[in-house]
Image (cartoon, grey):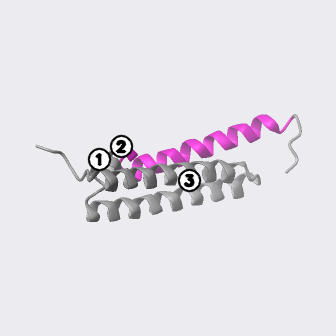
Amino acid sequence: MDLTAASRPAAGVLFLVAVDASLNAYSSINSSPWTSENFGADPERAATCRKYVLLADGASLALGALGAGIAGNLWPLFGAVVVVVFMHYLYTRALKKAQESGSDGWKE
């Protein structure tokens, strides 16, 4: 992909907009990684979390692909992929920590 001096600002904006849209997809579809870490030892809650993480992964990639298609530029897809990799890692790590600690809900 040729990034001329004139196209760099637009590429940056496209990348950041895709990152923002992807993060919004995660925040609207999922609870936070913190919540997953504190409730994820419950097998049903962990399975539900994984389902919604995959839905957010798909929504983010779809938004990035659609943005890339509309813009005729791959930067929106790159932005979405960065977020998907990072957020999928965060949720996987949070669920692993929940399993290790046995944290499955509020303790009374």
Say which element carries label 2: helix
State if disc 1 and disc 2 touch (CB < 8 Å).
Answer: yes
Which comes before the other along the chain, label 3 or label 1? Answer: 1
Q: Nearer the viewer, residue 82 or 46?
A: 46
Residue type beneath disc 1: Asn
Q: Which mark is residue 101?
A: none
Q: Which mark is residue 38?
A: 1
Residue type beneath disc 2: Trp
Q: Residues within 10 Å of mark 2 (few under 14, many from 20)?
A: some
State if disc 2 and disc 3 touch (CB < 8 Å).
Answer: no
Q: Position of residue 15 (x, y in %)?
A: 68, 43
Q: Residues within 10 Å of mark 3 (few under 14, many from 20)?
A: many
Magenta part of the protein: which range?
A: 6-33
* Quarter of the image where the C terminus is located: top left
Which comes before the other along the chain, label 3 or label 2? Answer: 2
Whole-number angstrom distance, CA of label 2 to CA of label 1:
6 Å
Q: Give the left or right position of residue 90, taking residue 67 as reference.
A: left
Q: Position of residue 95 (x, y in %)?
A: 38, 55
User: Majority secondary structure of the magenta segment?
Assistant: helix
Say which element carries label 3: helix
Whole-number angstrom distance, CA of label 3 to CA of label 1:
22 Å
Q: Nearer the viewer, residue 13 or 51?
A: 51
Q: Which mark is residue 84?
A: 3
